[in-house]
Image (cartoon, rainbow, N blue to C red):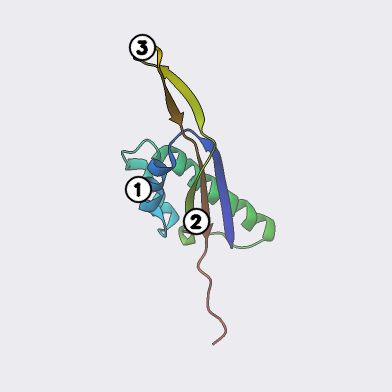
């Protein structure tokens, strides 16, 4: 079983969000939530919210399909951060110049899955 959650237009740069996502990629979902809870990076909060949403989506899918659900079986099968739209702002500088400030946004995607059992032996 596989469940997905996406957070779009998050006001954190993609490079900073990727640093946090790389910490938890491939880990078990409960362990990843614990890592994100104590990570000092500011991007760990939106990533943990996306992970919690993916786990909740998995629970809903399991209930809908009538499948037994165990949260401890879930692991992060896919995790990536894409660049969202950039807000362009201008800062006044000396002698009438203006410097552009790019306020970048991110699209965070996490997919949680249960390990598939090999039964064709």
- Outermost residue on the bottom side: it is 121
How far apart are the alpha carbons under marks 1 and 3? 48 Å
- Label 1: few (<14), some (14–19) or many (≥20) C-alpha neighbours in 10 Å: some
Q: Earlier in the sequence, mark 2 or mark 1?
A: 1
Mark 1, secondary structure of its residue: helix
Q: Residue at x 41, y 49 (%)?
A: 21
Q: Residue at x 56, y 46 (%)?
A: 6
For disc 2, the marked residue is 71
Figure check: 73 above or below 13: below
Q: Nearer the viewer, mark 2 or mark 1?
A: 1
> In the rendered image, which quarter is residue 64 located in?
bottom right
- The numbered dot on residue 95 is 3
Q: Earlier in the sequence, mark 1 or mark 3?
A: 1
- Label 3: few (<14), some (14–19) or many (≥20) C-alpha neighbours in 10 Å: few
For disc 1, the marked residue is 35
Placement of the N terminus among the 4 image quadrants: bottom right
Residue 82: image location, x then y, percent: 50, 46
How far apart are the alpha carbons under marks 2 and 3? 60 Å
How far apart are the alpha carbons under marks 2 and 1? 16 Å
> In the rendered image, which quarter is residue 48 located in?
top left
Q: Earlier in the sequence, mark 2 or mark 3?
A: 2
Q: Between residue 94 and residue 8, name the one nearer to us.
A: 94
Residue 34: image location, x then y, percent: 37, 47
Placement of the C terminus among the 4 image quadrants: bottom right
Residue 36: image location, x then y, percent: 37, 44
Q: Residue at x 53, y 55 (%)?
A: 111
Residue 73: image location, x then y, percent: 48, 62
Determine contact: label 2, label 1, CB under 8 Å.
Answer: no
Q: Nearer the viewer, mark 2 or mark 3?
A: 3
Q: Between residue 78 and residue 73, name the one nearer to us.
A: 78
Q: Residue at x 68, y 60 (%)?
A: 65
């Amino acid at each position: 079983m596989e469940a997905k959650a996406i957070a779009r237009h998050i006001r954190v740069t993609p490079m900073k969000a990727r640093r946090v996502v790389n910490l938890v990629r491939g880990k078990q979902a409960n362990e990843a939530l614990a890592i994100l809870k104590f990570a000092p990076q500011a991007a760990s909060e939106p990533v943990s919210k996306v992970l919690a949403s993916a786990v909740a989506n998995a629970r809903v899918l399991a209930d809908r399909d009538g499948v037994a659900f165990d949260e401890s079986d879930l692991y992060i099968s896919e995790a990536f951060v894409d660049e969202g739209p950039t807000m362009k702002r201008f800062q006044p500088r000396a002698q009438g110049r203006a410097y552009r400030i790019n306020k970048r946004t991110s699209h965070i995607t996490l997919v949680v899955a249960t390990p598939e059992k090999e039964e064709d032996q």
